[in-house]
Amino acid sequence: MSHTPHELHDEFPDAAAQIHALKTQDKRFAALAERYHVLNREIHRIDSGIEPASEDRTEELKKERLSLLDTIQLALKASEVSP
């Protein structure tokens, strides 16, 4: 399988260990990361022509992905200041 852009470790390359730790310690973060992964794969299949979708649907999915990224980034920042 080819490399899929927009994976969390690509989006936050300096936070790989932090992402892994949060996924194992924080159920909410783990759910966000899983939703992001599923959504990202769906977008990749659409962009690759494997799965058909309208432009509106594709745009909707990409907006949701961006929103998830914002939420994940906030969670990463919040965990940096937590003990």
Image (tube, rainbow, N blue to C red):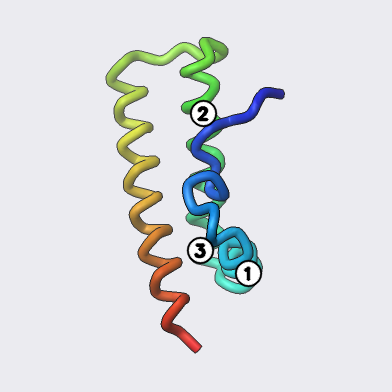
Measuring 47% from the left and 27% from the top, which residue is drawn there?
A: 43
Residue sitting at x 42%, y 67%: 75
Instruction: Give the residue at mark 2.
Output: 42
Compute the Cα span from label 3 to label 2: 20 Å
- Label 2 or label 1, whichever lies nearer to me, is 1
Q: Which of the 4 image quarters holds residue 65?
A: top left
- The residue located at (60%, 63%) in the rendering is 23
In the displayed orientation, state which residue is furthest to the front: 14
- Secondary element at image label 2: helix
Where is residue 48 shown, x and y percent of the image? 53, 15
Q: Earlier in the sequence, mark 2 or mark 1?
A: 1
Q: Which residue is denoted by mark 3 in the rendering?
A: 29
Name the quadrant of the N terminus: top right
Amino acid residing under circle 2 = Glu
Q: Which mark is residue 21?
A: 1
Q: Earlier in the sequence, mark 3 or mark 1?
A: 1
> What secondary structure is marked by label 3?
helix
